[in-house]
Image (cartoon, grey):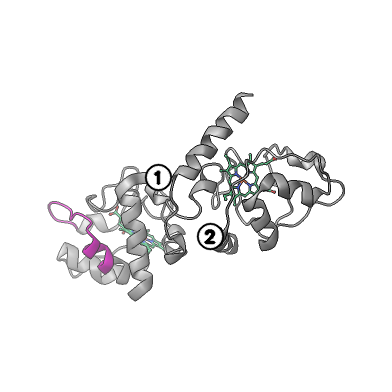
Amino acid sequence: MNRYRSLFFIFIGSIAIVSGSFTAFAGAERRCQMCHDFTTGENKIGPSLKGIIGRKAGTYPGYEYTFTKYIKGEPWVWTEEKLRKWDNNSERAVREFTGNPEAKTKMPRQSFTGVVEDNIITYIKMTSQGGVVSAEAGAGVSCKMCHDFTTGKNKIGPSLKGILGRKAGTYPGFKYKFTKYIKGEPWVWTEEKMRKWDNNSEKAIKEFTGNPKARTLMPPQHRTGSSEDEIISFIKITSEGK
Ligand code: HEC
Ligand code: HEC
């Protein structure tokens, strides 16, 4: 009973959050995410960029920097302007910021400009301001309370990493409820099936299994129109880049 109860409250919480225009910048920050985390604080190939705006350069705990050895005195503080220079050309930026023409960084040059760069900056601002919640503001937000899309971790719901093209109810390590209603081969998740599911998982599970008694643990999300389109494009982007 408790499990259903907490699912219910999470569901109520999820509809209270207005979804922003995630599609406006979806994807751009993913180029940084190959090497950087923005929200959990974990160091990857590069240091975590959680709260990067306002942070002193080269100071994230537990990360071994290369460029810090060229800093004399106090490190600079990351501002939007400095980040733009860095995204645009980290090799040049590190020389400018340290005032040392020999300075080097192990971050490969990114050469981002124009709209893509603006999108990256917007994303970074969002993650810097409000930590995790505003970082995830946008189409995927209500799904992200229960689902991971990128790391492969199961949460309240199964990870949706690479969900398009995946067989339903097969993500390793997750205890599904709806699978017991599947007779034969499970369906493969397509955009069309995903739309039905986002719209009303209770109805969709009956249709997909052909069993009017079929149930699912996932509460109906009632996604339609542009908010649904945003979720679908978000899912497409995360599915492509698995
Ligand atoms: C191929 C991996 C890779 C990619 C892609 C990448 N970075 Fe980096 N980044 C690094 C590494 C490695 C460092 C550490 C540099 C050093 O120590 O010299 C770093 C450092 C940084 C720092 C300094 C952090 C601090 O604590 O001072 C910022 C800011 C940064 N990256 C932003 C970005 C942004 C924004 C993007 C996307 C546009 C991006 N990076 C893409 C590997 C990467
Ligand atoms: C309150 C938590 C919650 C929210 C919010 C939620 N889900 Fe789920 N979702 C679940 C649970 C739990 C399951 C497993 C259902 C089962 O086993 O019956 C699931 C299953 C799924 C599956 C099937 C995955 C598979 O491996 O076959 C998809 C697809 C899915 N959810 C998509 C979404 C999308 C897209 C959103 C956002 C619109 C969303 N979910 C929001 C809890 C949630």
Find disc 2 in the rendering and name its residue: 234
User: In the image, residue 168 lies at what x, y percent?
Assistant: 73, 50
Callout 2, which amino acid?
Phe
Marks 1 & 2, CB-CB < 8 Å contact: no
Specify whether residue 126 is in view.
yes
Measuring 18% from the left and 53% from the top, which residue is drawn there?
A: 75
In primary-sequence order, the first of circles 1 and 2 is 1
Task: Locate the N terminus and report the quarter of the image it occupies.
Answer: top right
Q: Which residues are magenta?
A: 71-85
Specify whether residue 111 is in view.
no
Q: Is residue 208 magenta?
A: no
Callout 1, which amino acid?
Val
- Residue 142 position (above or below residue 98): above
User: In the image, residue 142 lies at what x, y percent?
Assistant: 51, 47
Task: Tell me if mark 1 has few (under 14), some (14-19) or many (20+) residues whose alpha carbon lies within 10 angstroms of its own.
Answer: some
Closest to the observer, 75 or 33: 33
User: In the image, residue 11 lies at what x, y percent?
Assistant: 54, 39
Distance from the alpha carbon under mark 1 to that under mark 2: 17 Å
Find disc 1 in the rendering and name its residue: 133
Measuring 29% from the left and 67% from the top, which residue is drawn there?
A: 90
Circle 1 sits in a helix, a strand or a loop, which is it? helix
Q: Is residue 74 magenta?
A: yes
User: In the image, residue 150 lies at what x, y percent?
Assistant: 54, 53
Beta carbon at label 2 within 8 Å of ligand 2? no
Task: Locate the C terminus and report the quarter of the image it occupies.
Answer: bottom right
Q: Quadrant of residue 239?
A: bottom right
Which residue appears farthest toward the top when viewing the image?
1
- Residue 181 position (above or below residue 160): above
